[in-house]
Image (cartoon, coloured by chain):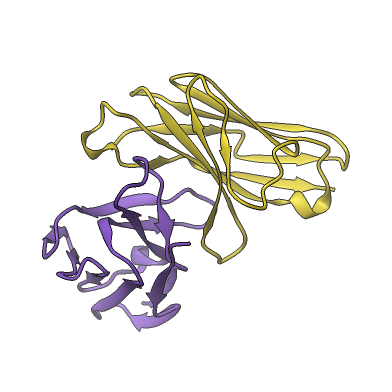
Chain colours: A yellow, B purple
């Protein structure tokens, strides 16, 4: 399958600071990237859909100004958690789909464990 | 919104046993996917199903796309310790953008040696 790389895998930050998470498609052009949040032993909750060159579409209840998403190129999308608070601590996962892939299946990054202290 | 009901929520089995889990939906899906997630990792695609009635295998894994388009099951035969993890079904309803998926709640599988 296609390779999606997410960085960093773990990050600890102080409350009030911002954290940027990168999601890269390594061997295909990702026209669409998705950002999820996952709580322990729970399912994936879609936060937003990101299309290259356009504004992200956020799911209901997700704060746009809190979770800034940028999809500036066909291989990179970033999620910035602004003014992080302890309740933002979670596992964040990206996935990517590309029109060049058969059936445009979503391939996932390795995830980022964010801990806000 | 779309909802997928996945069951069972958890399973505790002995090595060598077969496993079955399923997902049902209140509405039609045109694609069914099964993922496995190891602790601290992202989900990995196991099997993708695109046609009602389709039965697909991947090694010891077999999955089927229900005829009604509202359900799918995943079977694992002769389980081994490395099968441990969380299994998610995911569906893509007709008319939505490519890639946007609805996930089931997950099945936590524990395999005792």
Determine if residue A45 is in view: yes
Q: Would you identify the image quadrant in which residue A98 lies?
A: top left
Q: Position of residue B17 (x, y in %)?
A: 25, 81
Reply above or below: A89 against B12. above
Residue located at (85% from left, 48% from top): A117
Residue located at (47% from left, 48% from top): B42
Q: Is residue B30 left or right of residue A50?
A: left
Determine if residue B16 is in view: no
Front-most of residues B55 and B4 = B4
Reply above or below: A96 against B38. above
Q: Is residue B111 left or right of residue B50?
A: right
Reply above or below: A22 against A108. above
Q: How many marks?
A: 0
Instruction: Pick the quarter of the image with the N terminus of chain A.
Output: top left
Reply above or below: B29 against B108. above
Front-most of residues A48 and A7 = A48
Residue located at (19% from left, 70% from top): B68
Q: Position of residue A109 (x, y in %)?
A: 47, 39
Q: Would you identify the image quadrant in which residue A9 lies?
A: top right
Residue located at (87% from left, 43% from top): A15
Q: Position of residue B32 (x, y in %)?
A: 27, 58
Q: Is residue A105 left or right of residue A38?
A: left
Q: Position of residue B14 (x, y in %)?
A: 33, 82
């Amino acid at each position: 399958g296609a390779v999606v790389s997410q960085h960093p895998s773990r990050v600890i930050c102080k409350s009030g600071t911002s954290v940027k998470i990168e999601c890269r498609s390594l061997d295909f052009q990702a026209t669409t990237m998705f950002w999820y949040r996952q709580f322990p032993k729970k399912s994936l909750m879609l936060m937003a859909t990101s299309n290259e060159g356009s504004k992200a579409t956020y799911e209901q209840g997700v704060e746009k100004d809190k979770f800034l998403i940028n999809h500036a190129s066909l291989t990179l999308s970033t999620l910035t958690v602004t003014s992080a608070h302890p309740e933002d601590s979670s596992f964040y996962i990206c996935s990517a789909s590309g029109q060049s892939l058969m059936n445009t299946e979503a391939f996932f990054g390795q995830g980022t464990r964010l801990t806000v202290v | 919104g779309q909802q997928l009901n996945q069951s069972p929520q958890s399973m505790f089995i002995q090595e060598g046993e077969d496993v079955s889990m399923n997902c049902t939906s209140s509405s039609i899906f045109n694609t069914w996917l099964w993922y496995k997630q190891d602790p601290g990792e992202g989900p990995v695609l196991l099997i993708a199903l695109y046609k009602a009635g389709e039965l697909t295998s991947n090694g010891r894994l077999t999955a089927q796309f229900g005829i009604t388009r509202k359900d799918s099951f995943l079977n694992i035969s002769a389980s081994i310790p490395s099968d441990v993890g969380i299994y998610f079904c995911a569906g893509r309803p007709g008319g939505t953008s490519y890639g946007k998926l609805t996930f089931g709640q997950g099945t936590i599988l524990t395999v005792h040696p």
